[in-house]
Amino acid sequence: MSKASSSSSSSSSSSSSSSVSVDPAGLLASGRMEKSSGNSLINAAALDAAQLQANLTAQLNELETLESMYSMPGEFYLHDPEAKARLEDYCLDLQSALGTTTALPPPPPEVSYDIRLQCGMHAEQPVEVVITVTYPRTYPDKAPTVYVRLLNHYHTRQHQSYLNKTLNQWIKNLSKGDPCILQIFSWLQENTTSYVSSIRPQQLSSVECDTENQPHAAEFERLWIYSHHIYSREKREVVVALAKNMELTGFMLIGKPGVICVEGSRQDTRAFWDQIRRLTWQRISLKHQENVTDSPTADGVGLLQHQKFPKFVEMTGMNAEGTRDMGQVFRFLRDHSCGDVIPLLFGVSAANQTVAS
C-alpha cells in the first residue's frame, strides 16, 4: 500500500571537486540519482532539471490549448485554480536555477482537471461523459491517468468499467514523449457510443467477472470541500442523498463556513464532487484531497479499512446559544483522526486550536 503525497524535499550536494548545479524535486535526497564525482553529477542534475522543465512546459501548453477549446461553462474544470500559476512559477525557477547552485523548492502538486464531452453527437443517443485527467510530473514522458464517467442515466457501472478498461489498454500503446490528451478525447468521441451500445448484458457480466478476478490496485480517496456557507435545506438534502446513494461516508458541516467531507472509492468521490459543484453556490472549492492506493480484497475490505467515518452525517457545530463552536468542530475532527486538516480548512494554528477547544 502506498499513500500519495504532494510534497518532496529539495536539496543540493557537493563533491570534493565541485558543487551540484541544481537538484530539482530532491532527486539526490530521494535516491533517484546516486552520488558520483565531478562533472558527471553536475551534468546529470542539469539534464534532470532541463527534462523536468520541458515536461512541465508541455503540460502548461496543453492546459492552455484545452482551456481555449473547451471554453463554454462547465466544459473545463481545473481542480486547483492555482495549478497553472504554480507550474509557470516553478518553470521560471527551474530556468533561472540552471547552471547555478540555487536550491529549488519542492515541485508543485500534480495537475488534475475534468473535461465534459458529448460523444457521438450524430448518434440516436449521444453519450455525455466527464473525463478526469491527472498529469504525473513526468508527463508527457509518462502516460496520464484518465478516468471516464458516463453521465447518462441508462448506462450502468459495468458500461463505465468496460469503457475505462478498453481506453486504458489503448493509452498504453501510445508513444511517450508527446502530449496525448487530444488524441484520447478524439478516441472517446469516435468510440464511446459504439462501445457502450454494442456490448450486451451478458458481455457486461463477463467483463465485470474478468475484472474482479484479476488482482488490481484500487484507489481510496477522501475529499475536503469548502463552501462559503451551507444553509439551504434543499441543497443539504441533495448532498446527503448523493453521498448515501454513492455509498460514501463522511460529514457535512452546516453553517458559515460550510465543509463537506466524503470518502470512498475515487470513482465515486469524483462523481459526487462533479454533481454537487454544479449546484448554485456563492463559493465552493475542493480544498484538499487524500489518496491511498491499495489492493482490495473481493469483499472490498481493502478500501474500507481506510475509512475514518462510519457513515455520512450532518453536523452543526453549534453551542447552546446557537453560534458556531469551533472547539466542538476541532474535537470532532481530531476524534476522527483528521486534526491535520484543521489548518488547511480554517487557517488555525495548533496553539489556537488548543485555545478554541
Image (cartoon, rainbow, N blue to C red):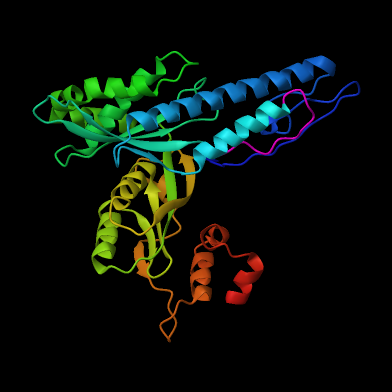
Judging depth in this view, the residue of 340 and 59 nearest the camera is: 59
Quick check: 239 left or right of 42? left
Numbered-mark total: 0
Q: Quadrant of the C terminus?
A: bottom right
Instruction: Indicate whether residue 64 is drawn in magenta.
Output: no
Residue 110 % position (x, y): 52, 36
Measuring 60% from the left and 70% from the top, which residue is drawn there? 353
Quick check: 176 left or right of 16? left
Quick check: 155 left or right of 101? left
Measuring 84% from the left and 17% from the top, which residue is drawn there? 38
Judging depth in this view, the residue of 110 and 256 nearest the camera is: 256
The picture quadrant where one finds residue 92 is top right
Judging depth in this view, the residue of 151 and 21 nearest the camera is: 21
Q: Which residues are magenta?
A: 98-109
Residue 283 % position (x, y): 38, 57
Relative to 218, say whether 309 is above or below: below
Instruction: Indicate whether residue 99 is drawn in magenta.
Output: yes
Measuring 26% from the left and 28% from the top, which residue is drawn there? 162
Quick check: 26 left or right of 112? right
In the image as oriented, which residue stretches furthest toward the bottom?
Answer: 321
Relative to 215, say whether 243 is above or below: below
Visible residue check, residue 144: no
Residue 312 % position (x, y): 35, 61
Judging depth in this view, the residue of 144 and 183 nearest the camera is: 183
Visible residue check, residue 104: yes
The picture quadrant where one finds residue 150 is top left
Relative to 166, say whether 155 is above or below: below
In the image as oriented, which residue stretches furthest toward the left?
Answer: 124
Main SS, magenta region, reads: loop
Residue 52 % position (x, y): 61, 25
